[in-house]
Amino acid sequence: MLDIDHGTYPFVTSSNTVAAQAMIGSGMGNGAVGYVLGIAKAYTTRVGDGPFPTELLDEIGQGLGHRGKEFGTNTGRPRRCGWFDAVMVRQAVKLNGIDGIALTKLDVLDGEKIIKVCVGYELDGKRIERFPFTMGAQARLKPIWEEFDGWSESTQGARSFAELPATCIKYVRRVEELIGCPVALVSTSPQREDTILMTDPFRD
């Protein structure tokens, strides 16, 4: 959503960030790429200004930022944090032709009693299923929530999907349904070994 052409203009970066830019920038044809892996956190963050329908301006949002170490690498500026926005991710999946998602920072949700996911927006009293492109409409969006039971157990150190708490597995499976894309891998800590491969995206 920070792509200069397809993102939340003018709150975007100065270049194209969609997957197709990899082919354009390298000089390869579209057929050279066999698998597009998207990367999404188990919650949503944003740096700087711009529309953020699921932003949490409370202790929960602060807790996500603290546990997830959501601070700018160079500036140290805190990132804005909120619940997972399935509408925005679904739109990114379609825009980029994503084949599988790497769902990261699942452990940051450990301990939350209730977890919410945005499954649609209310715009001027009507439900919509896409992220609008005009600034005025973006500013008036109200998230439509679906709630999930959280989990008290720690997910860190899990080496297989089956080792995750049942409510965590339910959350991941529902995310797959909502974004229309399979989760290829999940990570449960910053450590490289705490990565659970559901489908190997790097397999020939």
Image (spheres, rainbow, N blue to C red):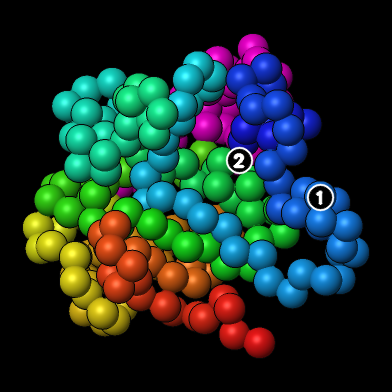
Q: Residue at x 45, y 30 (%)?
A: 46
147 vs 177: above or below: above
User: Local crowd at mark 1 within 10 Å, few (<14), some, or many (≥20)?
Assistant: few
55 vs 102: above or below: above
The tag earlier along the polypeptide, 1 or 2, is: 1
Snapshot quadrant of residue 88: top right
Residue 18 visible, this angle: yes
Give the amino acid type for the residue marked by disc 2 in the picture.
Glu
User: Is 34 left or right of 173, judged from the image as shown?
Assistant: right
For the residue pair 104 and 75, the one nearer the viewer reads as 75
Q: Please, which residue is most extreme toward the left here?
A: 152
Residue range highlighted in magenta: 121-147
- Tell me residue 183's x, y (percent): 48, 68
Give the amino acid type for the residue marked by disc 1 in the picture.
Gly
Residues under labels 1 and 2: Cα distance?
32 Å
So how many labels did they put on this image?
2
Which residue lies under the disc numbered 1?
25
- Tell me residue 119's x, y (percent): 47, 44
